[in-house]
Image (cartoon, coloured by chain):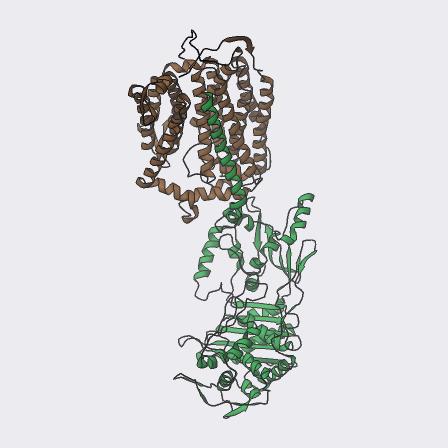
Chain colours: A green, B brown
């Protein structure tokens, strides 16, 4: 009977080998996807209770990990001025993921980025507890506070950039929320708060500054004007400004909401009065391709380069003439984030050079060693320096004597453009103001979705320009 | 047909080395490993060694010493590796259960209970070693043992039984739950071995040839077929598919080893496939098991347990989170059916592989005892018990690691649960007795010769 017994032992050996091979397979092939699975509580909880680095504005943390006193969850995330900085930090939750800088820099904050491999090895050898890196941001607390306060109870957003470096100085979105309530160790309370925020009518979890896109309205005329100047026009060129522009192949026609000052006017005056028919006609003359090319040179239809999760702005493709005329004044399917419009203004103010926008200057270890840095880099040159200078001249006219007068700040050179974008007949239009100040070198986009005021009182100049003023004055 | 002749006894005597001191050293090492695992896990969770450590150390080492002394006294020639391996697995299981006791507040005391069961298991081991001088005494009562097995299997269907996790396989007596099938697994193995040993020649040689295959006579085959099918039917009826698989495997192995005909395992495979397809078509829970094996993530809630086990294994990685530093509490039944996943999470893939290899060592030693054993009953029994252990490990660890669909079986010596632990200690005791008999000094036999001439030879039936 030994013969069969020997064969049985081979069979047994094969069974054991199958177990070992399968374990190897689990480790080599399945492990990674299992660890990345969103429902893996082990990974989620470990990330949640990690000693993450702080996010710093100046020397003050706006997000930091503090000891919780609980053995199972040793660290807890804390936001000293939660609502003020929530548009930047984002939320950090156990169950509902992360957003904002917490998401963008999660590896660095957790200390698990590949750039931190050496530090991890040193920590392991020296027996020091592993800790994540800190983020040094370029944000300006005064500007942020001014932006949030000026927006007040309205729904809206503000983005302020140093146009020479691309550094973000303020990134505001209202209404805000308190990320502390979502980061609490009390999972039940956090879940209830999350549900409440998610279902709130004013949608506080939306980051209106970078994650949402809206019709830019008349602020888009800057891009139409840029295309016109690049094609040979100058501020004094005569352009047609009829009281009504019939849209080709359509039963509709475009009218003006302001007095353009006659059947013809100069390009400069058309921008100052925000003349719809003049820019609609310019758009028709330039053509859809020319407009689309200029918009894309400013960053439309491309992935955002900013170091925070952001959405791409859109300029429609394959459009007919009527749609081209509407797109030229920032209506139809044109949609831009406030960040995108701030970048457009920054490129114009920076003589045609667009810098890559950044929020984080440096990623620092706890011993202040720089792990990585975002030095100012040129992203593109959408327009020539000459075009930029002429656009600046026109934008300064807008603020000096046009629709942008409410944005004037004594002693500062300000250029800007208002916008009042129609959405649906049953909801109030969006109010925009985009502009720059020469000293300090700042480009600001203000967007107000809904301020709760009467419809007739809504205009970019009346609602958004004062916010711009507050932010610039805070930076002065 | 050639006839094997009785080999002549040579003058030589084969004497195996007893190696009891080696066993003692290995045993001490194995026990310290279990004790260390317990201490480290407790320290990592509590931040201090539990104040009960001198008592635990004393009881644990005392248990090992007792088992070793009994072996020295009654089974001096038994294989020296089996006992340390069993203590290693048992200790690791205890450490893991004690570590998982600390997860809820207030902590549970399952490990204390499991330790009592371990002591009972060692007592059963010692009892068998002392009382069962020769395994061949078990050969006498195949029908009685079969009846006893059937009674054990039927016990859960009496008012004593309780239903747990969809299977009615437990009984509750004086507050203790007990799984009679675990004992029946062993009594059936003995009954099968005894029957097949008695009938192996008639099963092989007498019968009709149909399509080139020798079919045994009904009177030889029907009794065992009835026994086998009754046992299987009871288990299928109780929804205990894991145990049914073990008994099916055990029966097939014994039939194959006794008759030496490959036809039987081939037939068994075909029957298994047919039964599998039928179960897949006709029942609702078999397709569910198969789906949760192949596509667990299609239904997260229904396959929560197997998914958590996979997450645990991934979280453990190659070397594990360390004892006490993982999250095995997230996997339901992490102390019993899924203890392999808990081990994998805290000791890593490497640790779980080591456990599989230790099982492999125990099984190989049992099969080796079968090979060495001079009598056919011992060969059948040792081979059968070793194979059943291997099959059980394969089914449960394979199920937990998604090599196979999951069958509800315990992980031998490690899972929380008294009946399985005591039964497996009983199994080891019988294997040790056979091993002792097999390795006892005995007269060497010359190689059997095949009679080719018309010599005056004696025809032997044994």
Quarter containing the N terminus of chain B: top left
Q: Give the x, y percent position of residue B256.
A: 40, 25
Q: Is residue B207 left or right of residue B74?
A: left
Q: Nearer the viewer, residue B380 or B386?
A: B380
Q: Give the x, y percent position of residue B179.
A: 39, 28
Q: Nearer the viewer, residue A279 or B94?
A: A279
Any part of residue B102 in sight:
no
Residue B278, image quadrant:
top left
Residue at the limit of the structure toward the left, as seen here: B218
Q: Is residue B124 left or right of residue B285?
A: right
Q: Nearer the viewer, residue A77 or B319?
A: B319
Residue at 56% across, 42% down: B317
Q: Give the x, y percent position of residue B243.
A: 39, 30
Quarter containing the C terminus of chain B: top left
Residue at 55% across, 26% down: B56
Examine the rendered structure and indicate whether residue B102 appears above or below residue B201: below
Examine the rendered structure and indicate whether residue B285 appears above or below residue B161: below
User: Total marks drawn?
Assistant: 0
Residue at 47% across, 53% down: A189
Q: Give the x, y percent position of residue B296.
A: 43, 45
Q: Nearer the viewer, residue A333 or B161?
A: A333
Q: Is residue B307 left or right of residue B212?
A: right
Q: Is residue A165 left or right of residue B237?
A: right
Any part of residue A177 in sight:
yes
């Amino acid at each position: 009977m030994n013969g069969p017994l020997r064969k049985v032992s081979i069979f047994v050996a094969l069974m054991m080998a199958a177990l070992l091979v399968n374990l190897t397979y689990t480790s080599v092939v399945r492990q990674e996807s299992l660890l990345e699975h969103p429902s893996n509580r082990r990974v989620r909880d470990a990330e949640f209770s990690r000693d993450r680095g702080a996010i710093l504005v100046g020397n003050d943390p706006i997000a930091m990990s503090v000891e919780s006193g609980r053995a199972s969850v040793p660290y807890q995330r804390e936001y000293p001025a939660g609502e003020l900085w929530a548009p930047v930090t984002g939320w950090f939750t156990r169950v509902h993921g992360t957003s904002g800088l917490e998401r963008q820099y999660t590896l660095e904050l957790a200390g698990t980025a590949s750039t931190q491999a050496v530090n991890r090895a040193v920590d392991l050898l020296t027996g020091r507890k592993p800790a994540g890196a800190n983020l040094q941001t370029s944000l300006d607390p005064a500007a942020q506070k001014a932006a949030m306060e000026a927006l007040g109870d309205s729904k809206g957003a503000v983005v302020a950039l140093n146009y020479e470096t691309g550094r973000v100085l303020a990134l505001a979105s209202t209404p805000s929320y308190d990320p502390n309530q979502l980061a609490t160790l009390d999972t039940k309370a956090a879940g209830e708060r999350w549900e409440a925020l998610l279902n709130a009518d004013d949608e506080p979890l939306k980051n209106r500054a970078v994650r949402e896109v809206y019709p830019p309205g008349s602020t888009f005329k800057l891009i139409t004007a840029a295309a016109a100047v690049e094609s040979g026009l100058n501020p004094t060129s005569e352009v047609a400004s009829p009281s009504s522009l019939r849209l080709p192949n359509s039963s509709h026609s475009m009218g003006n909401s302001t007095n353009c000052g006659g059947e013809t006017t100069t390009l400069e005056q058309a921008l100052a009065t925000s003349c719809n028919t003049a820019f609609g006609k310019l758009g028709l003359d330039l053509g859809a391709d020319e407009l689309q090319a200029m918009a894309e040179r400013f960053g439309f239809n491309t992935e955002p380069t900013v170091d925070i999760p952001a959405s791409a702005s859109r300029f429609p493709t394959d459009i007919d003439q009527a749609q081209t005329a509407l797109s030229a004044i920032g209506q139809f399917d044109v949609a831009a984030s406030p960040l995108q419009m701030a970048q457009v203004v920054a490129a114009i103010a920076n003589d045609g050079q667009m810098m890559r926008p950044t929020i984080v200057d440096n990623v620092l270890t706890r011993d202040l060693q720089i792990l990585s840095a975002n030095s100012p880099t040129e992203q593109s040159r959408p327009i020539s320096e000459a075009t930029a200078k002429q656009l600046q001249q026109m934008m300064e006219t807008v603020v000096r004597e046009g629709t942008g007068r409410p944005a004037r700040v004594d002693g500062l050179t300000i250029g800007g453009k208002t916008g009042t974008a129609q959405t649906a007949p049953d909801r109030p239009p969006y109010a925009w103001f985009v502009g720059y100040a020469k000293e300090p070198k700042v480009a600001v986009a203000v967007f107000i979705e809904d301020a709760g005021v009467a419809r007739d009182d809504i205009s970019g100049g009346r609602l958004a320009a004062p916010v711009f003023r507050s932010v610039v004055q805070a930076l002065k | 047909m050639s006839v094997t002749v009785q080999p002549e006894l040579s003058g030589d005597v084969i004497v195996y080395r007893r190696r009891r001191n080696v066993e003692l050293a290995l045993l001490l090492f194995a026990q310290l490993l279990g004790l260390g695992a317990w201490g480290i896990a407790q320290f990592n969770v509590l931040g201090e060694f539990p104040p009960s450590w001198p008592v635990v150390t004393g009881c644990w080492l005392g248990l090992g010493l007792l088992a070793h002394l009994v072996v020295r006294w009654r089974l001096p020639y038994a294989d020296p590796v089996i006992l340390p391996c069993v203590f290693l697995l048992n200790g690791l299981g205890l450490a893991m259960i004690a570590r998982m006791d600390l997860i809820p507040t207030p902590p549970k005391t399952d490990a204390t209970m499991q330790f009592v069961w371990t002591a009972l298991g060692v007592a059963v081991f010692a009892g068998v070693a002392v009382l069962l001088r020769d395994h061949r005494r078990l050969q006498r009562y195949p029908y009685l043992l079969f009846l006893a097995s059937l009674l054990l299997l039927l016990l859960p269907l009496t008012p004593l039984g309780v239903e747990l996790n969809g299977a009615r396989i437990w009984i509750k007596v004086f507050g203790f739950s007990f799984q009679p099938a675990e004992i029946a697994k062993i009594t059936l193995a003995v009954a099968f071995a005894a029957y097949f040993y008695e009938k192996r020649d008639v099963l092989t040689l007498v019968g009709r040839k149909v399509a080139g295959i020798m079919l045994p006579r009904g009177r030889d085959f029907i009794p065992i077929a009835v026994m086998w099918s009754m046992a299987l039917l009871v288990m299928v009826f109780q929804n205990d598919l894991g145990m049914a698989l073990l008994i099916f495997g055990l029966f097939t192995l014994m039939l194959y080893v006794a008759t030496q005909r490959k036809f039987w395992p081939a037939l068994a495979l075909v029957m298994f496939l047919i039964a599998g397809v039928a179960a897949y078509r006709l029942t609702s829970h078999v397709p569910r098991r198969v789906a949760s094996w192949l596509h667990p993530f299609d239904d997260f809630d229904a396959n929560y347990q197997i998914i958590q086990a996979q997450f645990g294994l991934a979280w453990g990685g190659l070397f594990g989170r360390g004892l006490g530093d993982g999250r095995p509490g997230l996997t339901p039944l992490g102390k019993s059916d899924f203890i392999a996943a808990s081990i994998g999470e805290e000791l890593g893939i490497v640790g779980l592989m080591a456990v599989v290899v230790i099982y492999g060592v125990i099984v190989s030693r049992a099969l080796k005892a079968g090979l060495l054993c001079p009598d056919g009953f011992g060969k059948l029994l040792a081979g059968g018990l070793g194979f059943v252990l291997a099959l059980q490990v394969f089914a449960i660890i394979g199920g937990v690691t998604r090599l196979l669909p999951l069958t509800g079986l315990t992980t031998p010596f490690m899972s929380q649960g008294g009946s399985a632990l005591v039964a497996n200690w009983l199994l080891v005791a019988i294997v040790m007795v056979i091993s002792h008999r097999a390795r006892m000094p005995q007269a060497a036999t010359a190689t059997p010769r095949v009679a080719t001439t018309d010599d005056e030879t004696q025809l032997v039936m044994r």
